[in-house]
Image: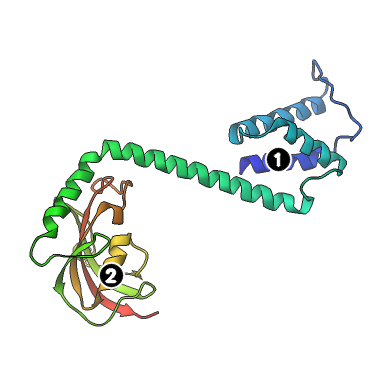
Amino acid sequence: MRVFKSLAIIAVLTMMVSCGNQKVDVRSLETEIDSASYALGMDMAIKVKANFSEAKTDLFLQGYRNGIDSTGLLIEEKELGKFLSAFFQKQQAERMKEAQEKSAKEAETKFAHIKKAGEEFLALNKVKEGVESTQSGLQYIVLKEGKGDNVQPTDKVKIHYHGTTTEGKVFDSTVDRNSPYESKANVFVPGFNEALALMKKGSKYRVFIPQELAYGSQQRGQLILPFSALIFEIEILDITKS
């Protein structure tokens, strides 16, 4: 984090400043050291202001003074790095969460018609002959049932899949590429993972994945718009047990 690096500069400054010095505002910078010292302090303040506007100036300065004197420390020096690292990681995670929530809200307004179309498609599809549904909302048709044990999340699977939008546009297909895909069975979107867990070696299913079990508010390429319901035909060619 830039803030953490800026704060770390304090440790260097403590080697340059006497604890007996008293704060005096100067009107001009007489030497190169004067200019560098002022620039370093100003640079640090700007970065703290930009990245941690909640910082309390009095406590910031108290921590600086205590660090110079090495007395009256309210946080042990050996705990300093660990605390600051954890704190700013938490701050960053919270900002990312806020940004994602804002982006999702904006997408929900802009792509409300996509979400509605997907819901209407699945509502009509649900009552069609041969369509089964799970508690999560995943829908599927058994095209061919396999034999043996069901796929487990940690199993390695060799599969063919053919993915389309609800309008029938192909966005990805190992079948078209004639190149099966091999991976752990728990690395796909939730609806795809759930479908795999229903299947056995030799199974072939057509699955209809609601947007909340697919990519949600994310856009993936030109065809998978935010809140898109997806359709896959999945065939299990082989399973390697974990």
Residue 72 pos. (x, y %) = 84, 43
Q: Mark 2 belongs to which amino acid?
A: Leu
Counting from the top left corner in percent of width and height, residue 10 is at 76, 39
Residue at 23 percent across and 69 percent down: it is 160
122 in relation to 145, above or below: above
Locate residue 36 relative to residue 85 in the image: left or right.
right
Q: Position of residue 39 (x, y in %)?
A: 72, 28
Residue farthest toward the left in the current orientation of the protein: 129
Front residue of 231 and 5: 231
Residue name at image x 30 percent, y 53 percent? 212
What is the three-letter code of the residue carrying label 1? Leu
Dividing the picture into quadrants, the one containing residue 43 is top right
Which residue in the protein does label 2 denote? 196
Which of the marked residues, 2 or 1, is nearer the chain's N terminus?
Answer: 1
Is disc 2 placed on a helix, strand or loop? helix
Res. 33 visible in picture: yes
Q: Which residue is mark 1?
A: 7
Give the residue drawn at x 59%, y 36%. Answer: 51
